[in-house]
Amino acid sequence: MQNNSEKKSIGEKFSILCGAILFTIFVIGLAWSISTGMAGFWRGLPFWIIVIFCLGLLFYDCYEEMTK
């Protein structure tokens, strides 16, 4: 564990950013696949709302981790 006074290294920030980008690509691809498949856009809309909310939480947490 790190002390709160220590800054994150460039490698740690890069890892956080890469993980967030890979997760974003996966989840958006999954949502797109559900919406264009048999579910259609309107039945896939609740999933899109959940995905957008979760991505907002992810990027907020990434920002918090990178700035402390």
Image (cartoon, rainbow, N blue to C red):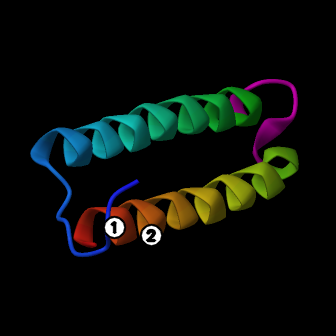
Q: Which residue is mark 1?
A: 63
**Which range of residues does the magenta coloring cover?**
36-41
The amino acid pointed to by label 1 is Tyr
Residue 45 magenta: no
| Kind of element beneath mark 1 | helix
Number of callouts in the render? 2
Looking at the image, residue 40 lies above or below residue 42: above
Query: Residue 62, position in %: x, y?
Result: 39, 60
Label 1 packing within 10 angstroms: few (<14), some (14-19), many (20+): some
* Residue 10 x, y percent position in the rendering: 11, 46
Judge by depth and name the residue closer to the eye, 43 or 14: 14
Q: Residue at x 33, y 58 (%)?
A: 2
The circle on residue 60 is 2
Q: Is residue 35 left or right of residue 26?
A: right
What residue is drawn where x is 59% and y is 37%?
A: 27
Which residue is at a point 75% across and 31% down the rendered structure image?
Answer: 34
